Amino acid sequence: MHYFSFNNSVAQDLFMKTSNVRVAITGFGGLDIPHAGASVARALRAGWPGPLIIDALVDDSAMTGAWQSGVVDTVTRIQSPLKGDEAFYISLINSQKKLGFNAFIPCLERDIAATARLADRLHKNGINTLVPNADKIAQLGSLTLASYLHQHHIAYPHSLIAHHLHEVAHYADHLGYPVLVKGAELELIAHNAEQVLRFSSAVLERDRRSGVLLQARIAGEAYSLVCLINQDGERVENLSCRKLAINSNGHSVCSSIIVSPELETQGLEIIKKLGTKGPITLDLIHPTGGSIYFLEGVKSCLPDWCMLGHWANKNLAVELLKLLTEPEVDRRIFPSNRTNDAPLLVRSITEDVVRLDDMQHLDRHGHINVTEMNNFQSQSNNSDNTINNEEGLRVAITGTSSFDLVNSGIGVARALRSATGDLHLIGLCYGTFDSGAYNKELFDVCFQLPITENENNLFERLKKIIKIQPFDVLIPCLDGEIPFFIKFADDLKKLGVRTLLPNLESFEKRSKTQLFSGIYKADQQGFMIPETISAHNEDEVLAAVKKIGLPAVVKGPISFCVSVIDESQAKAAWHTLYYDGMKEVLVQPMISGPSFAVATVCNHRHEPLTMLTVKKLSLCPKGSTWRAMRLPQVELETAFARFLKEIKWVGPVEGEFIRDEILDRFYLIEINPRFTGWIYYSARLGSNHPQQAVHTALGKEVIPALDKTDLVFVRSTTELRLQPYQLASFSTKGYLHHKRIASDQIKEN
């Protein structure tokens, strides 16, 4: 097995376009578990050899992947197949009449299944698509696949289907942990009984008719093989990648193209047995010490790593569109020049704003021209707030990962980068796969920090980094590291590094254990602090639940929150948190309503510089904000400012609230002692909180700018390209240089 890149320019030259090609694509949602549509669109945009118009078809304006700048030309609302095949068909035909596309690439399982059932009718109306037939789609569904694989002697992990929630825990115990929980479109890895119940409940809420699949996890290396099969069942092209890093969702965050005759032989044999057509992606596991590849899953679409194929000169999205638009062209597989410099893909996130009017226009009229919208955004993306008179100002930022959760350091860097001026950004990363480390648009150079509980070791590493690459301001962006930086703030100042942090007493006053201990008045004259009971064992948890009532939430003192609706779930929640090392939990009543957040930066007089309140419109299952809009709440902001003054807060902070939908009251859920993950939004609105923090840390007075109110924050996933030497350099040398700072200034450490 070895890594390689392709040179397929001969095939590319055979197919130059002189007239516009127009293609419609679905699958722009998924948030932190992205659907493939945006990746397919990016690959087509990057690799199509001629004029191309891409129409995104969405059944919800919250599909954030469709709002990415430069990816699609239009966004159009269609009916979901969940509303019925006929509704889906009519909306497709109406969209085709309006837009004029002749090729259709569905990238969502339910869209693919409906398209298969409607393929003949769509073709008669001039919509060309390439999907398996309807019977084959039904056989290869996530909940029917195991039976098909067993009949055709294809190796797969032990799997069980539960149709009722009460069956789930027993089946999971039988399979052992961790276990993969699968629905028609949702896949999550569960590590304990509580997670299995929670994830299975989410699956069943989406589709109670199908049930939930529980699949044993096999230890070994993970791979993906994608193949393109034409209408006659002939292989057009295939491509394999190795998943170098997988997050807790089971989703690959770093991948590399590989060539493995063994993998290709077994994978193509599986595809032959499946008897499908169109694009097909296999997820495979090679058990440690084994010789057979186990098939974990099948998707009848291109993968969400299409850009990796494009970077390797093997763009399967382009090949698929060629089949749909010019099926008579010879599609022979050309020999490839293979080298050892194949690029790698690192999953990252991108953030932007959309005019509220544009989002409402899509909801009301069902269509919007994104090209015109992007032209407006590019004209309005020039901030008048500059970091000036600071020639060569150097700012270091931690929290650069989007591996499992989106750390706020990425948004901080993006906000500072959007401010003009001579600014150097230094990333301080804890993991080799921190996506920020490889984002040359954000960071000039990145250094690794050790993951250690030894504070002296961490400080010695920091001193070494500062000696190699001095910086003027440091912005910590992770909860767990802030006490360390508070403790060493004076030492850092002696090294020329300024921070903007509270003291340890103030830091503890906003911790959950103190915030919900009863020392603060429940009614803060603008928000409420919910009733909370501390519990240290199972009996105390049950007693707390009995007193507070159900439904309730069981929280860890630092992180993690479990919703419970009965005593058995309360027991499971206690054991989950206890085995995660938490000896104390907090029990609160569950509050139903929309989520809000207030972000600000406090100066040394404990005064908020500006208050930015947002309503969270889209949250991923882990609670990160992927869509939000500014919604000022004067009474809430005044009360929160008063509370921050009371605890003598300094620096960035975020208060998270839920607005009770019955009582119309705000309840404080937690206070985060750092910038929020969506803080880039402040830069696009005008106030730029990270910029305020830098100025304040340097002792400058800040005159806040007024925020705009007509923009919606959107976040979506994207792919970063890197070379193997970059990953190796960062892993072994502990730094990675991108630009601006001369490489000869960076010494090996």
Image: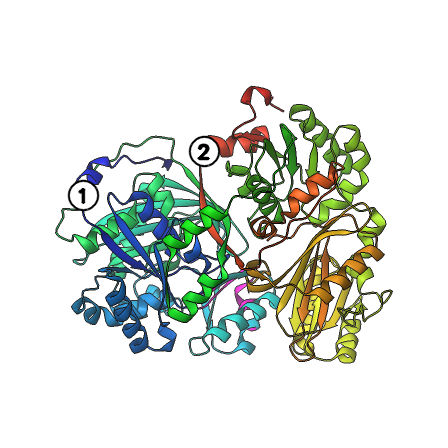
Q: Is residue 228 above or below residue 441?
A: below
Q: Which residue is mark 1?
A: 15
Q: Quadrant of the C terminus?
A: top right
User: Which one is in front, 367 or 23?
Assistant: 367
User: Which one is in front, 71 or 708?
Assistant: 708
Mark before the other along the chain sequence, 2 or 1: 1
What amino acid type is highlighted by mark number 2?
Answer: Pro
Instruction: Please give the range of residues in magenta.
Output: 170-186
Tell me if residue 292 can be seen: no
Residue at x-position 79% and y-position 79%: 547
Q: Is residue 413 above or below residue 274?
A: above
Residue 622 location in percent, x, y?
58, 60
User: Which one is in front, 631 or 405?
Assistant: 631
Where on the picture, by quarter, is residue 133?
bottom left
Residue 273 location in percent, x, y?
26, 59
Q: CA distance from mark 2 to mark 1?
A: 31 Å
Q: Which residue is mark 2?
A: 724
On residue 240, which mark appears?
none
Residue 183 highlighted magenta (yes or no): yes
Residue at x-position 18% and y-position 43%: 15
Q: Nearer the viewer, mark 2 or mark 1?
A: 1
Residue 232 location in percent, x, y?
16, 58
Is 606 on the left or on the right of 180, as rendered? right
